[in-house]
Amino acid sequence: QLWISGAEVSLTNFLASFDEVPAGEFSMRNLFNVYKFENQIWTLRMTGDEIHKFLEHAYGLQYDTMKSQNDNLIAYKRDTDGKIIMSDFGPELKTVQYNYSCAAGINYTVDVSKPAGERISITKMSNGEPFEPEKIYRVTMNDHLAIGGGGHTTEGVQWNDSIVLSRIIATSANDIRRNFSNYSRNRKRLESSSRDDWKVIPTPWFDVAAPREKEFLGKYLK
């Protein structure tokens, strides 16, 4: 998204849960497995404060508040006794997976020891420049998120349709899969790697809880 848009910050949601892309030639079939939706890429104007609110909403949907490393990392739906609600398909998440979102282009932490709405600390831009709450940034995201999917812009940033339209800088002519295809053709080799733009803290809690949560969810989310 940063490559196609030239934006400073990219906001994106979850692509796939347990799908894998094998080593070897990368095909359009692989791309359909990785990205299943017919979305376009939009570039919009957002203040630093609005980016912060977007992320607070996103991680409020994704993570629970932990009191120790023994607590759940992922936010689930719970019954009146506080137990995770189980359906025929497994544990019910607080929100659907494709509403899990994160950012690139900024460095930040997510403190899961704090309640939703108070977790995000943005330290700087990924290029080393200061991050300023009042500054207007060029931000790229898909149209699903921009128009309120998951409530990121409507509930988190408090935008309505008219505000969204007033913030648009550009929209891509092609959908995300076509743009990713073009990106791939400009490179002889694609590798899966982390940009390390963000991390979850406290780190010792995350290091214990994340593998446990992955094993638990892996039994159901295929």
Image (cartoon, rainbow, N blue to C red):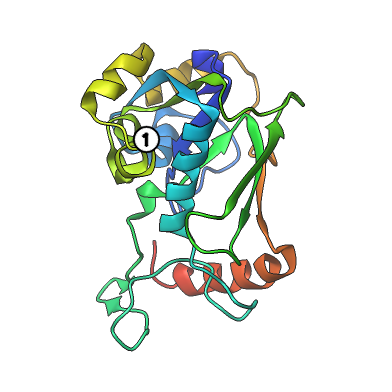
Can I make out residue 110 in this image?
yes
Q: Tell me where residue 42 appears, x and y as whole percent.
A: 38, 20
Q: Is residue 11 left or right of residue 199?
A: left
- Residue at (43%, 66%) from the top-left corner? 75
Q: Residues within 10 Å of mark 1 (few under 14, many from 20)?
A: few
Outermost residue on the front side: it is 134
| Location of residue 206 with respect to 197 vertically, above or below | below
Outermost residue on the right side: it is 128
Can I make out residue 191 in this image?
no
- Residue at (74%, 69%) from the top-left corner? 204
| Image quadrant containing the C terminus | bottom left
Residue at the disc numbered 1: 32
Q: Amino acid at mark 1?
A: Phe
Q: Is residue 129 left or right of residue 35?
A: right
- Residue at (47%, 59%) from the top-left corner? 116
Q: Is residue 141 left or right of residue 126?
A: left
As helix, strand or loop, the secondary structure at mark 1 comes to: helix
| Location of residue 196 with respect to 129 vertically, above or below | below
Of residues 134 and 192, which is closer to you in this image? 134
